[in-house]
Image: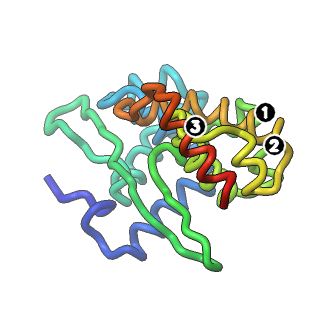
Amino acid sequence: MAESAVSHSHPLDTMLAVSDVIRNDRLAKLYARVLELDSPTVEELSEGIESSTTTIYEDVKYLAEIDLLERVTETQPYRYRASQVDMTIQAGGETFQITPTLLVALAERQSNENISLYIDRHGVSGLATAIEYGRAYTQSKMNARIMSREQEIPVLEAETILQELQEIILEAEPDISTSLNIEELDAAVDERLDE
């Protein structure tokens, strides 16, 4: 089986492939669904996606061609697994992380009003930044007030997006540590407030 281009191809090819998924809700939903089901067949995917089976076959074929999905079986029905995307992009002095969590959050934009509104206000780059805050929030290392101050957004908006992203992060990153250490949280909050 071919090596995954997402982890071994030229970074520009990877970036272009991922940008297709970022811009296309249908591809983002399909990627998220494969990630959720671990290694589904096209038939299993068609049960949870509102597209024709033909469209799903074409999209799976395309995602496999750009190495965002990899076929994990040699016999039909083929099973597919989502490739792990981990890219860092620097633009305008800012750094953005593109991970499966971002792609899953983008897939939610059609069905989640809060995520859709956040993307409308802050763009995909704002959502990527919010996910970084969401990880720290999920790990009890920061709170919405810190995000609000640092991103210059209302506290309610920060709290809303953090809560929405927390669910996605826990689903897309099951290995994330969520143990609450009050002393560590207090120290992290105090440190950030002193900055």
Left or right: residue 144 compared with residue 33: right
Q: Which mark is residue 186?
A: 3
Labelled pair 3, 1 in contact (Cβ < 8 Å) = no
Secondary structure at numbered mark 3:
helix
Where, quadrant-wise, is the C terminus in this rendering?
A: bottom right
Left or right: residue 173 compared with residue 148: left
- Residue type at the position of mark 3: Asp
Q: Quadrant of residue 81?
A: top left
State the CA–CA distance, disc 3 to disc 1.
32 Å
User: Does label 3 or label 1 sit earlier along the sequence?
Assistant: 1
Left or right: residue 85 compared with residue 16: left
Secondary structure at numbered mark 1:
helix
- Residue type at the position of mark 1: Glu
Labelled pair 2, 1 in contact (Cβ < 8 Å) = yes
Q: Which mark is residue 113?
A: 1
Secondary structure at numbered mark 2:
helix
User: Does label 3 or label 2 sit earlier along the sequence?
Assistant: 2
Residue 117 appears at what percent x and percent y?
A: 81, 43
Q: Residue at x 57, y 27 (%)?
A: 167
Residue 142 appears at what percent x and percent y?
A: 60, 41
Q: Residue at x 25, y 57 (%)?
A: 4
Pointer 2 residue: 117
